[in-house]
Image (cartoon, coloured by chain):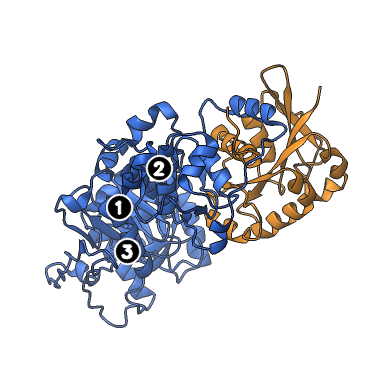
Amino acid sequence: MDENNSPLKVALHGMDERSCKVMGIYLQGPCKGIAVVVNDDADIDIFNVDTVNAGKLLDEHLAKQPHKPIIVLSFQDRKHEKVLHVRKPITINDMVASLEKARSLLGKSQKTPIHTFPSPDKSISDNKQLSDSDKKTETTDPSRPIKQTLKPFVTDAGEQKKTSRHRPQIELIDKSFDAFIGNVPGIDVNDPKQFSIATYNPKDYFQSHVESAYKVCQAKGKIRQLNSGWSPLLIFPHSREVWLDADDNKLRAFAGLALNSLDIKISISPPDPGSSSLTRGLEKFHDMDAFLWKLACWASKGRYPDFLDIKRPVYLKSWPNFTRLLITPHALRISALLIQGPRTLPNVAEVLNIKPQYVFVFISAACALNLAGQARREVDELFQPPEIQPNKSQGLMSRIISQLGTTKA
Amino acid sequence: MSQYKIFFTGPVGAGKTTAIHSICDVPPKIPHRKSSTTVAMDYGIMNLTGGEKLHLYRTPGPEHSDFMSDLLTTGGIGLILLIDNTGTDPFQDMKFFLNSFDKFIANTSVAIGVTRMDQSKKPTIHDYNMQLHEFYPKPPVFTVDPKVKNDVSLLVQALLYSLDPGLED
């Protein structure tokens, strides 16, 4: 990327945390990634002067760095020869025009940039269901001079300078499991005779499309939108987050649909410029791992992924980050057992004396995050898994767990 | 009656005191303070059914920890290690404390909470797990906000299940 296309680095002054987050998203989304918010080494400073002491701060800044471009945001017109002014409420055109002018002041506009929207992403790697519907290449329009210089969505590691809400959503207990996770009519996943059919193919579900789209975004280092005939999903690879305008009930219903049977066209594209609703929904950001984990649980419905052999052991690479994930019944116990060494899924259920569906849903989610998989080393099948020895303080520890929470892990 | 203990350790400012406050019934005594960190070891208490008490000890900063070994030998159930993700070298901190308590961990177990991840997203939990590749079995590593009871509670539960996955409440 040449300098004309590279995002400007801007520092924000006189704004509270939420305003900074929204501005970061605004620059990335509606302003097409023309700038990114940084803490250090900014090219341009943006001052909100409608705050206490902002005028003083601005004057001090001008005295210290007189040659650095400054953009001032205010409700009132301001005449100041050394700064660029954007009147509030800010419009995209005004903001982009000011940033371009600031870029020219920086000496970054030696050549006139000829902008085209980024070429569409090809269908996602190994998933043929994703088509590149975004093959439109926007032509330059003389009547819209600002758009000619708009930049594709590009982010740096700082991305939005925002923090999505990363809280453990729910700790499921046995009784609420079926209602929340769902089940598959006609199959008793807890019946050993039906284990061979208690499977699902993750590639048939939204889960797999999100995984694939995320890989594409990560490889390209760009924000992309996953279109599925439903609410578009915005994927932010640098911060490992997604944004979706839908609550968990809607998401659960969609995540549980086998999309391959519904003839739904799925594609990825640059974010829709009209997605300015982003600025209204910071709470709709999800951590990617927590999001994928949930999708896998809802696709699984108590089944296990069909790429696992029920008769062979599975391993767990590391504990899932449970404080930020949906905790399925007995998930901590399953993790504690599997982290000691590979076991078959039925063996885990037997040793812990729990329903196989709890093991299946856990392993589905862990596989989605690449934390678990089929053990393929000879040694993993060579030995019978050791029996777990009850701890000598078992009674005491049970009482501690009972005291710690009302929920069952 | 036996005295049961879980130890909370970690670098200065990692949130040990706050974490204990989040889950105990009787908070720790006000510590002797020097440069705003704990220089003596004291504890909070969790009351258990049957009248037993669990003592949640916070360790002093590492420069004051040379007297810890004797105290740790009796009644210790396990170790909670809190690492400040905004620290200069969180991995070094983790290794230091794991080494300092290696004998105790070998006889019990450890669970690691990474704090202040809202201020510094890196290293990630995955990065911590990669650092622990030689640790067997791998301890739980969770993002933890010491102020949030559920976070601290889950970390302690993971510690206990590590000791005995067959444990039921």
Q: Output the chain of dot 2.
A: A
Q: Which chain is blue?
A: A
Q: Output the chain of dot 3.
A: A
Task: Check if mark 2's residue and mark 3's residue have beta carbons within 8 Å.
Answer: no
Q: Is residue A85 visible?
A: no
The image quarter containing residue B150 is top right
How many numbered marks are there?
3
Q: Which residue is mark 1?
A: A201
Give me the residue at 26% from left, 47% from top: A277
Q: Indicate the secondary structure of the residue bearing disc 2.
A: helix
Q: Which chain is orange?
A: B
Q: Nearer the viewer, residue A360 or A223?
A: A360
Give me the residue at 54% from left, 45% from top: A335
| Callout 1 and callout 3 share a chain | yes
Name above or below for residue A116 compared with residue B135: below
Which percent across, then down, holds residue A197?
31, 46
Q: Nearer the viewer, residue B84 or B96?
A: B96
Marks 1 and 3, the one that precedes in the sequence: 3
Q: Which residue is mark 3?
A: A33
Q: Horizontal placement of A121 versus A7: left or right? A: left
Mark seen at residue A303: none
Q: Residues within 10 Å of mark 1 (few under 14, many from 20)?
A: some
Q: Indicate the secondary structure of the residue bearing disc 3.
A: loop
- Kind of residue indicated by mark 2: Val
Q: Is residue A232 visible?
A: yes
Q: CA distance from mark 2 to mark 3?
A: 39 Å
Q: Output the chain of dot 1.
A: A
Name above or below for residue A121 compared with residue A158: below
